[in-house]
Amino acid sequence: MDALHETGGAPLADALHRTGVTIREAGPDDAVAGVSPRWVALPENTGEVAALMRVSAEHDLAVTPVGGGTRLHWGPPPERCDLLIDTCCLNQVLEHASGDLVVRVQAGLTMNSLAETLAAEGQELSLDVPLDGATVGGVLATAIAGPRRFRHGTARDLLIGITVVLADGTTAKSGGKVVKNVAGYDLGKLFTGSYGTLGVIAEAAFRLHPIPDDRRWIIAELPAPGTPGTEAVQGVQGVQGDGRPDAAEQPGSPPGLDVLATELAASQAEPSAIEVDWPDARGGPVVAVLVEGTAADTRARAVRDLMAGHGTARITAGPPDWWGTLPGEDVLLEVRVPPSRAGGALRAVMARGLRAHVRGSLATAALQVTLPPDVGGSAFAEFVSRVRDDLGRLGGGLTVLTAPQELAGRVDRWGPVGALPLLRRVKERFDPGRRMSPGRSVGGI
């Protein structure tokens, strides 16, 4: 605690010391999107988090929660950051009611550790998070989800209970450990995707699924745009040949990605995930489908036959190398449109002339886009602006998840958000002093 007395003053140092929480000086690796905190606290339970938040309120400290630290560079930098609350010691499975398919855990538990614990009982949390070392709290705060979001939903859908500590140190709970209990479920929805701007997630309860006894992947390589005899990608619904959206698909246009996605989603084979990977506009996209559970092999053959009309399809016992991973890390964007317009979104991105790599859920139209790290600032800003215009006409939008500040500073990271006035009121209600990760979320919240 000597460092506290040297840098924070005796009253603050004594107050932090009385919490009983381990405190250390922050180092270079603790920076949040380039902003360095003064101290890092390592609480071991919800009560200690609450004690830290009460001291922070008394001394007007800006607080940022952190889990595994794998995505501290995502989102805008905070306006200020005095105290980093590291949840690495909040890493326990508090209760696993295997008979009820429910688990309650502390927020700092890593998703890998949770998966190992649940697998011992033949169960899983069906999120497929594409982040190594990610924690439960971090997954909720960033609202990240993997391929099986199509069948099982996102973290918000699987969350049935949450315990949070608010900016003034109040501990709040909603939901519970029973799947049918939905009391207070809105609190879980609010904190999922909040980027730590409303409070600290301390505990979470999820509904689980049995691990499927069999899985098959069906992989189809679609032809490149302009391939003679086919326009499987160029003819997608909602986009003209120059990348500008149409009001509707032109009559008689050949089957495209939108058609394939619709057929797969409605298939009686009931796929759990429908993913696309398109590394280069000069080549064709790859579509991979997962079926799991009873009669997986028979259902896989039905999916293969359906996909065969769009490209060369094969069945494998394991996923493609790119499955469940992000396409890149340096300049990463997220595209979302209505599911029926996923193909149009892909075409809009790939028609802009930059070396874009797109990957994500074709079925739910939640796609990640990476650009070359050496993309120029003007080219980046023009790409974001024009793609946003195209996606807006398709009913969607684009978010800049992470990019060097010289790029991100040229654009609005979030783009137009219709619910911004409501989100501002929520922020005012939960954090009127603007001390929780200020500026990290949409609209500078």
Image (spheres, helix red, strand yellow):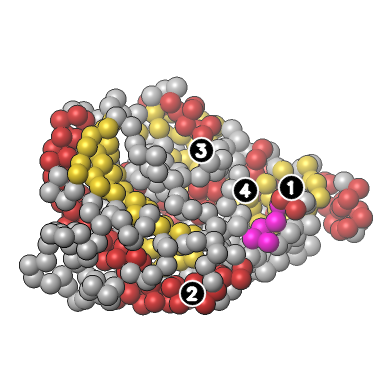
Identify the residue position indicated by label 4 in the image: 69
Residue at image point 27% right, 75% down: 242
The image shows residue 112 at horizontal and vertical percentages of 51, 34
- Mark 3 lies on a secondary structure that is helix
Q: Residues within 10 Å of mark 4 (few under 14, many from 20)?
A: some
Mark 2 vs 3: CB contact within 8 A:
no
Main secondary structure along the magenta-highlighted residues? loop
89 or 225: nearer the viewer: 225
Q: Amino acid at mark 4?
A: Gly
Between marks 3 and 1, how big is the CA–CA gap?
A: 22 Å
Kindly identify which numbered label has been placed on residue 111: 3
Q: Earlier in the sequence, mark 3 or mark 1?
A: 1
Mark in the foreground, 3 or 1: 3
Q: Quadrant of the C terminus?
A: bottom right
Q: CA distance from mark 2 to mark 3?
A: 37 Å
Mark number, residue 379: 2
